[in-house]
Amino acid sequence: MTAATAGTVLVARLDNAGDVLLAGPAIRAVAHAAREVVLMVGPHGRAAGELLPGVSRVVEWRTPWIDPEPSPMTGAHALRLLRILRRTAPEQALILTSFHQSPLPLALLLRLAGTPRIAAICGDHAGSLLDVRHVVDETVDVPEAERMLALVRAAGFDLPPGDGGALAVRRPLPETGPLTGPPGYVVVHPGVSAQARAWPVESWTGAVRDLVRAGRRVVVTGGRGERALTARVAGTDAHDLGERNAGKYAHDLGGTHAGTDARDLGRTHAGTDAHDLDGRVAGPQVPGTGGRGAGPHVIDLGGKTSFAQLAAVLAGACAVVVANTGPAHLAAAVGTPVVSLFAPVVPAVRWAPYGVSTVLLGDQRAACRGSRARECPVPDHPCLSSVNSERVVEAVDRLTSVREVVR
């Protein structure tokens, strides 16, 4: 069987949202030749998978040897996957992994489910588990998106003509103007999935303050579990988060994440009517910024967006300030420049935002380099704590060719 005769192809990328987004070019290459692409993900990657062009449908299984919060590997858990695979009945499967992950446990389960052709990158002896065993030199750091694309090419798939291999998401994205105001703001996303990749909270707060003083509108984003963090970084009262965005209505922006009614923007943001926005959204004054009424401001969207809405918010930004976490790759997928606060616990060459203008901040030669640590192994976290907010403002200025005028 060759790529040219592919029917249903299962592509597996079983870890976090950013990893799934980085698989996008490889998935589009498979979709170019396959009748159907079924993407297999873990629970942390599902929302990202549903945004990828070329994906026909998504199936989910929490993978005990990859998931950061693994469930026990039991017979019942394995049988659940076998049922999924037998219902899917792929003619081929491609297992996409990072250099430190083994494809062989999943290859074994695919074989037990009857999958006739399986491909993966694998340096170990695979016996009869793999039909395409693609071997790469793992001592050479290669961007994850390109590493995965190399595998699918080895399996006989390639991108369609005119597809340059950038990250991408499905369009159109949801309308998020009522949440953010007009495009041109800076997104600050302070949350991370691992403490070792985090910039200190005080540094995030200082960066927001300095961006506002520099005349920038700032939108702070985060997940449902990060509301206290985004409130602190944005300078809002966490207790009042539910009250600061009056005028929410259930059907706004898709219904699941209530937004702010545009008619109420003036009442919730310093008394300015929506008709008077004129390139800005009024907001609370920040000490030291000067001005009256509608001045530079911060909007806290912590916990207020779905993944697709977050993509739209990032698409409307002139730049995104973010650590090494999923929204960095989501920003790249919508083409927005990134200021990347990157801890070197993993190589930036592999996992920095791919295919967009990026300023990389953080000591890439720090003692934690290459450790893959989730908790910082070095006192005081010097790789990122050494970065000050002034450098972030300078990086944003460098990335944005036309600076937004905030009156």
Image (spheres, rainbow, N blue to C red):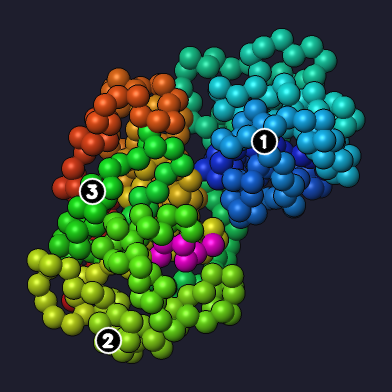
Query: Which residue is outermost to the front?
Result: 239
- Which numbered tag is attached to residue 272? 2
State yes or no: discs 1 and 2 in contact (Cβ < 8 Å).
no
For the point 44% across and 78% down, which residue is it? 260
Amino acid type, mark 1: Ser
Q: In which quarter of the image is the C terminus?
A: bottom left
> What residue does disc 3 label?
202
Nearest to viewer (mark 1 / mark 2): 1
- How many residues crowd around disc 2 within 10 Å: few (fewer than 14), some, or many (20 or more)? some
Q: Mark 2: which secondary structure? A: loop
For the point 28% across and 31% down, which residue is it? 381
Q: Quadrant of the N terminus?
A: top right
Residue 255 drawn above or below residue 161: below
Residue 89 drawn above or below residue 114: below
Q: Which of marks 1 and 2 is nearer the N terminus?
A: 1
Image position of 38 (left or right of 185): right
Amino acid type, mark 3: Glu
Q: Mark 1: which secondary structure? A: loop
Q: Give the range drawn in magenta.
A: 301-306
Q: Which of marks 2 and 3 is nearer the N terminus?
A: 3
For the point 30% across and 41% down, which residue is it? 199
Q: Earlier in the sequence, mark 1 or mark 3?
A: 1
For the point 48% across and 50% down, which residue is it? 330
Of residues 400 and 87, the one nearer the viewer is 87
Residue 392 visible (yes or no): no
Q: Mark 3: which secondary structure? A: helix
